[in-house]
Amino acid sequence: MSARTIAAAAGVNQALVFYHFGTVDDLLTAACRASTADRIGHWSTRLTEVSSLRELLAVGQELHERERELGNVSVLAQLLAGAQADERLAAPTAAALQLWVDEIESVLRRLLAGSPFAEIADVPGLARAVCAAFVGLELYDGVDRSAARQATAALDQLAVLIEIVDDLGPVARRALRSRVNRATRRD
């Protein structure tokens, strides 16, 4: 994308792109961060209100539908594709994704507090996995909506299993904790 194309779409003089941002890459970096921060701000309250992993998944599905309608899923796909071949796009795209990871990590820390999973979970890694799965499902949805829905349903089943474990009594939780400790020591 050229400065001329961007300036024409914005209805401004091409020199303004260079004056305010220096390069097209710097403009894309600023736009990526600003747009991501704006979208996180939009969803932050909903994410703060989430009280279960199933509810987090439901908010994720709602977020996906809304962001797809706005065209943000297409923009993300283009940024990810471009970042594969252009290091100048990789860093700002990764930084924008990290904003989402940070948001999801705080939700997961809150949701997993007191859960047997909290003792073994790498919450930052889990937050990255959740965000990566979400991005993958967004892209997958564009080529096979039925399969993406099936994958989302499988995640919902996993969330149900976690809720069941969290509702176990103290004796069963201790037994589970013991089994988890033995299993993780083998690794």
Image (tube, rainbow, N blue to C red):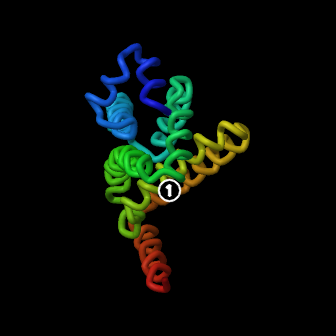
In the figure, residue 52 lies in which quadrant?
Answer: top left
Q: Considering the numbered disc 1 on the image, is that residue within a helix, a strand or a loop?
A: helix
Residue at the image point whose x is 55% and y is 24% from the top? 69
Above or below, 34 relative to 162: above
- Left or right? Give the position of 139 relative to 21: right
Residue at the image point whose x is 53% and y is 52% from the top? 85
Above or below, 174 relative to 164: below
Above or below, 27 relative to 171: above
Q: Residue furthest left?
A: 20
Residue at the image point whose x is 37% and y is 31% from the top? 35
Q: Nearer the viewer, residue 41 or 84?
A: 84
In the figure, residue 137 lies in which quadrant?
Answer: top right
Residue identifier under label 1: 162
Can residue 14 be spotted in the picture? Answer: yes
Where is residue 156 shown, x and y percent of the image? Answer: 58, 47
Q: Nearer the viewer, residue 69 or 81?
A: 81
The local crowd at label 1, few if under 14, some if 14 to 19, many if 20 or more residues have their Cα within 10 Å, is some
Where is residue 169 shown, x and y percent of the image? Answer: 42, 62
Q: Nearer the viewer, residue 183 or 179?
A: 183
Where is residue 100 shown, x and y percent of the image? Answer: 38, 44
Q: Residue furthest bottom?
A: 186
Count of numbered badges drawn on the protein: 1
Q: Nearer the viewer, residue 78 or 112?
A: 78
Q: Residue furthest front?
A: 15
Residue at the image point whose x is 50% and y is 56% from the top? 162
Can residue 104 be spotted in the picture? Answer: no
Where is residue 10 shown, x and y percent of the image? Answer: 41, 17
Residue type highlighted by circle 1 = Ile
